Amino acid sequence: MFPFQKILCPTDFSEASLCGLKMASEMAEKFGSQVVVVYVNTSIQHLPSPHVEASEITFDTVAYEKRLAKEARANLADIAASIFPEGVEPKLEVRIGQPAQEILEAAHDEDVDAIFMATHGRTGLKHIVFGSVAERVVSRADCPVLTVRSCDD
């Protein structure tokens, strides 16, 4: 019996993250696993900025985030339709907040057995500036995390 009956698969719509989705799709088809696909939209209020406080943002962030979430749901549905075979229906979820934290919360909320996620493989200055969502998830997750760098490697 395949040990992962429920898999969380985060995506940021990058090519690398689609590799994780393809792997989760294959596991779901072969072993009957359930897949939860989650996209995290970083809230404007959560973006780090030394120059702008969240209270200084003057446009309607709630309306903006609702529009982004609606667009993300549509993108998730399109991607799921193109990657997951007929008969495999992933649960699609959009969250707002810090990506690593939201991924970990989704894994807890959904009580998943594993997380399949991409890593962009950033090094040097890019890694220092942007950090690694995958690294933070791996170090804090309560379940196994399988990281995928690229479909071509």
Image (cartoon, rainbow, N blue to C red):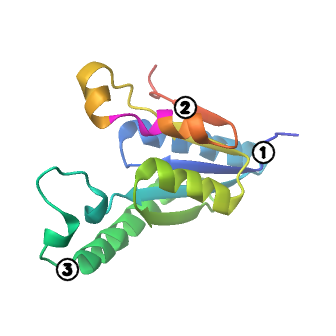
**Residue 60 disc label:** 3
CA–CA distance between discs 2 and 3? Answer: 36 Å
**Vertical position of residue 151 compared to residue 70: above or below:** above
Does residue 6 belong to the magenta stretch?
A: no
CA–CA distance between discs 1 and 2? Answer: 19 Å
Q: Secondary structure at mark 3?
A: loop
Does residue 134 belong to the magenta stretch?
A: yes
Residue 51 horizontal/vertical position (percent): 11, 53
Q: How crowded is the residue under tag 2: few (<14 C-alpha within 10 Å), some, or many (20+)?
A: some
In the image, which residues are magenta? Answer: 131-135
Q: Is residue 151 left or right of residue 33?
A: left
Identity, as a three-letter code, of the amino acid under mark 1: Phe
Q: Secondary structure at mark 2?
A: strand
Residue 141 horizontal/vertical position (percent): 62, 42
- First of labels 3, 1 by sequence position: 1
Closest to the camera, between mark 2 and mark 3, is: 3
Image quadrant in which you'd find residue 27: top right
Residue 100 horizontal/vertical position (percent): 47, 47
| Residue drawn where x is 36% and y is 73% of the image | 70
Closest to the camera, between mark 1 and mark 2, is: 2
Q: Is residue 9 left or right of residue 14?
A: right
Q: Which residue is mark 1?
A: 31
